[in-house]
Amino acid sequence: MTTPGASDGDRQATGVRGVKSAARTVELLELLASRQNRPARLRELSEALGAPRSSVYALIRTLASLGWVRTDPSGTQYSIGIRALLAGTTYLDTDPYLRIVQPHINDLSTSLDETIHFGRIDRCDIVYLATKESSQYLRPFSRVGRRLPAFSTSMGKSLLAERLDTDVFAHVPAELTALTPRTITERDALVDDLELAAERGYAIDNEENYLGVRCFGFALRYTSPATDAISCSVPVDRLSDERVAEIIAAMERTRLAIERMAPVDLAGASEQGGAG
């Protein structure tokens, strides 16, 4: 199914005419999900969707009655509902790769005592499917389900580097918005960085998402093109040349172990990592 902003090429590829009401429902749910723990008022949602308040309100009330949207006691602020959790956990429970990757990243995190992530490309973002935290650097929230721009993450850049000769810019937004002062925001500079990642076999996020944290990302090539990746996040004050070499070697061993165990899908997983 295509969204209202889908290209003619997307419509031809799917062979399905977009259903406006269904597309708007998905847009609304994705918008609420992207706000994480920040509820939205009707006016904000109407403006963000470019839709009349009356139609957005009717949609919200329907979704709220079904559990996909929740409201505050005043009934004026809206956030994602508990039914979204059911859909998300079902996706994770049935994913054939997560069950293989999870034990490996758990072991790797324990051996390095660093934070290890597993993610999947989705349009222009990386979605976090699993995280094993370092005992030295614990976050007060789970990363699972969170998304960050592919162009500024080590996981995302490792996967973009796999697409340099094909559809790399289908996964890069028109405008590269900086998350930190170190984020690469020039397309030519990004291509140079991706070419370097392709040459050495892994990508680096050098404080491009969080100041003080460097990440090393490795594409998992059990699909073609690769849609999944793992990464290691380390505070820069704990890094030395020797420590970097140790992390890279351990990540490479883990990548190879995962790829040996994972079912191979040479047709790729376009529904998981589709462009848009």
Image (tube, rainbow, N blue to C red):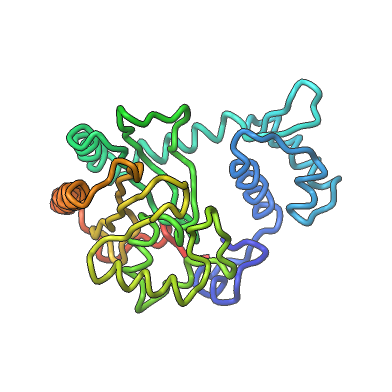
Q: Nearer the viewer, residue 187 or 3?
A: 187
Q: Percent x, y for residue 65?
A: 70, 29
Considering only vertical position in the picture, is 215 above or below 57? below
The residue drawn where x is 42% and y is 36% is 90
Q: Is residue 261 visible?
A: no
> In which image quadrant can residue 100 be found?
top left
Rendered-image quadrant of the N terminus: bottom right
Q: Nearer the viewer, residue 13 or 189?
A: 189
The residue drawn where x is 62% and y is 35% is 80
Is residue 72 shown left or right of residue 133?
right
Q: How many marks?
A: 0
Q: Percent x, y for residue 71?
A: 72, 28
Considering only vertical position in the picture, is 147 above or below 105? below
> In which image quadrant can residue 74 be found?
top right
Q: Percent x, y for residue 46?
A: 79, 49
Q: Is residue 111 visible?
A: yes
Q: Nearer the viewer, residue 28 or 175?
A: 175
Q: Residue furthest top?
A: 73
The residue drawn where x is 44% and y is 32% is 142
Q: Percent x, y for residue 24?
A: 69, 52
Is residue 51 shown left or right of residue 183?
right
Is residue 218 shown left or right of residue 28?
left
The residue drawn where x is 40% and y is 62% is 270
